Image (spheres, rainbow, N blue to C red):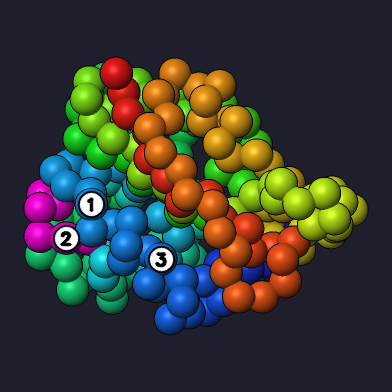
Amino acid sequence: MGFYEEQILPRWLSVVMGTKELAEVRARRMQQVEGAVLEVGFGSGLNLPHYGAKVSKLYALDPSKVGLELAKKRMSRVSFPVELLPLRADGRIPLDDASVDAVVTTWTLCTIPDPLQALREMHRVLRPGGRYSFVEHGLSPDPTVAKWQHRLDPIEQAIVGGCHFNRAIDTIVRDSPFQLDGVENFHLKGPRFATYLYFGSAVRA
């Protein structure tokens, strides 16, 4: 990683992803999460204020040291312990099989180089019957919007640390070991090529 990716991008993302509108979306998703939780793509901890009282522990996984530093104040304000997990070069999550009750990603699958492999790892550490909850942006079904997403995707990757506009998140989850049990799609305010959301969940059967 260069200086921009290590120092500037995490701070910029902490600001632009911390809007009131996104906070409302986060709150709606996080309130349904409980037990021991793994959050992949923890960033600067923007989800922390929105977890409900039934969360007993959070395992946080993120490659950005600056993001984790920015998260410290938010971590100090929650009632449950937060354990930062080391990022392994082989992509393996450093948790035992079936060791967490829930897995969460928000605006994360767009950036992971191999999202299917990441989902296989999340599935491995989730207990049977546990739930994977996600809020992700991705490919729009509108051909005009999708055309612009494909066209602008290389620029997005360069500016936002490998993030993709044009991943069909529901298809990726269906292709993983998870069983998709519900997804809602809608646009947030802003450019339509960047604001098409997948708000959903899947289970480990």
Mark toward the start of the polypeptide (2 vs 3): 3
Counting every numbered tag in the picture gives 3
Is 55 magenta? The answer is yes
Are dots 1 and 2 in contact, CB under 8 Å? yes
Q: Is residue 23 above or below residue 118?
A: below
Q: Considering the numbered disc 1 on the image, is that residue within a helix, a strand or a loop? A: loop
Q: Badge 2: how crowded within 10 Å, few (<14), some, or many (20+)? A: some
Is 60 magenta? The answer is no
Q: Residue at x 72, y 71 (%)?
A: 191
Residue 71, percent from left and from top: 36, 68
Residue 17, percent from left and from top: 52, 71
Q: Residue at x 46, y 71 (%)?
A: 22
**Residue type, mark 1 in image:** Gln
Q: Residue at x 28, y 76 (%)?
A: 73
Q: Please name the residue that numbered disc 1 is placed on.
A: 32
Residue 77 visible in rendering = yes
**Residue type, mark 3 in image:** Val
Q: Please name the residue that numbered disc 3 is placed on.
A: 25
Q: Quadrant of residue 204?
A: top left
Q: CA distance from mark 1 to mark 3?
A: 12 Å
Point out which mark residue 83 bears: none
Residue interval drawn in magenta: 51-56
Q: Main secondary structure of the magenta part?
A: loop
Residue 117 visible in rendering = no
Q: Nearer the viewer, residue 71 or 20?
A: 20
The C terminus lies in quadrant = top left
Mark toward the start of the polypeptide (1 vs 3): 3
Numbered disc in front, either 2 or 3: 3
Q: Badge 1: how crowded within 10 Å, few (<14), some, or many (20+)? A: some
Q: CA distance from mark 1 to mark 2?
A: 7 Å
Q: Considering the numbered disc 2 on the image, is that residue within a helix, a strand or a loop? A: loop
